[in-house]
Image (cartoon, helix red, strand yellow):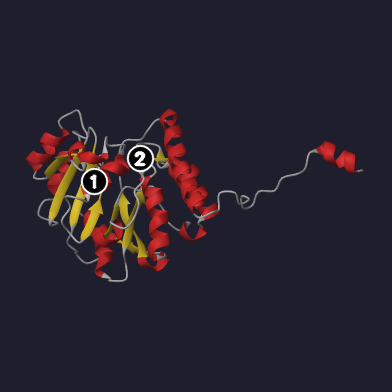
């Protein structure tokens, strides 16, 4: 998995999508920083606040996520909204960024799209530092405690991916249209595994975007996220016929009673 820093990459055009739910505090500055930098800026929204109005005023194309592919039924989460957004994104290169980033800059999108200048690269993942304010490094708890251990155990080729749950990705449309999309919080790790299976590690890259500051979830809210990530990996293992395989590096001792009986 090739690595880059955003500062060393060429400019590549494409369509950018920002999936949003109640991001009124940050969406305006994000859109303003991207208009004129890329071919298309799209906000796919499921908000109850002023997010869609602010995004439109800033220059984005805004779509209610429920209006895209309505025949597929209710929108079932972030991954579902991203999947539906492909129907209105026009570029051959597609980039997704989250809508809750503070101090967002165009280097996020330039960095993500840049590696696609190489025709061998099909998929790009962003990584960054996520500091707690005043508490040093510490963001990404589900990443460190759930996603990375699962990858090390079952997909060691992907263990070098620094932030497998990052919402900042870029890819060729032709690739994204041939993949399944997990509807909820598991979309990022499911996509990472599916891309690896589809095109291999040599067609994947990751880019250092420096720092991303956004709100952090309380610990009590992280259990459902970790469960979704685990369930998504388990589904991939089931498809591959590996769900019943013994876990790597797990050693169990027999019941003591069985040893006594044998003696």
Q: Earlier in the sequence, mark 1 or mark 2?
A: 1
User: In 3D space, how far apart are the residues under numbered discs 1 and 2 (Cα atoms)?
Assistant: 13 Å
Q: Residue furthest right?
A: 263
Q: Nearer the viewer, mark 1 or mark 2?
A: 1
Whole-percent x, y for residue 64 in the image: 17, 37
Q: Which residue is rendered at x = 19% and y = 50% of the image?
A: 87
The quadrant in which the C terminus is found is top right
Whole-percent x, y for residue 229 in the image: 44, 42
Q: Nearer the viewer, residue 49 or 178?
A: 178
Whole-percent x, y for residue 4 in the image: 33, 63
Instruction: Indicate whether 105 appears above or below 102.
Output: below
Q: Which residue is rendered at x = 55% and y = 53% of the image?
A: 242
Q: Nearer the viewer, residue 243 or 107?
A: 243
The number of discs equals 2
**Which numbered tag is attached to residue 113?**
none
Q: Which residue is rendered at x = 47% and y = 42% of the image?
A: 231
* Secondary structure beneath label 1: helix
Say which residue label 2 marks.
Answer: 184
Say which residue label 1 marks.
Answer: 84
Residue 141 occupies quadrant: top left
The quadrant in which the N terminus is found is bottom left
Packing grade of label 2 (10 A; few <14, some 14-19, many >=20) is: some
Instruction: Indicate whether 52 appears above or below 144.
Output: above
Q: Is residue 212 left or right of residue 241?
A: left
| Residue 18 makes an appearance in the image | yes
* Secondary structure beneath label 2: loop
């Amino acid at each position: 998995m090739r690595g880059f820093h955003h500062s060393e990459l060429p400019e590549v055009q494409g369509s950018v999508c920002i999936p949003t739910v109640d991001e009124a505090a940050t969406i305006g500055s994000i859109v303003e920083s991207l208009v004129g930098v890329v071919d298309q800026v799209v906000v796919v929204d499921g908000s109850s606040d002023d997010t869609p109005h602010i995004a439109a005023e800033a220059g984005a194309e805004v779509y209610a996520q429920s209006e895209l592919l309505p025949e597929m039924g209710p929108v079932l989460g972030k991954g579902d909204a991203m999947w539906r957004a492909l129907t209105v994104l026009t570029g051959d290169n597609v980039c997704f960024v989250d809508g809750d980033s503070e101090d967002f800059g165009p280097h996020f999108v330039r960095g993500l799209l840049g590696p696609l200048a190489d025709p061998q690269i099909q998929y790009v993942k962003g990584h960054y530092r996520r500091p707690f304010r005043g508490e040093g490094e510490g963001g990404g708890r589900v990443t460190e405690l759930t996603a990375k251990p699962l990858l090390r155990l079952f997909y060691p080729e992907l263990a070098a991916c620094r932030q497998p749950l990052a919402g900042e990705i870029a890819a060729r449309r032709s690739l994204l249209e041939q993949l399944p999309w997990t509807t909820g919080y598991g979309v990022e790790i499911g996509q990472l595994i599916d891309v690896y299976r589809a095109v291999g590690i040599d067609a994947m890259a990751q880019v250092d975007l420096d720092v991303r500051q956004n709100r952090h979830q309380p610990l009590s809210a992280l259990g459902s996220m970790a469960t979704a990530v685990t369930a998504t990996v388990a589904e991939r293992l089931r498809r591959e016929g590996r769900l019943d395989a013994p876990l790597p590096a797990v050693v169990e001792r027999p019941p003591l009673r069985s040893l006594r009986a044998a003696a």
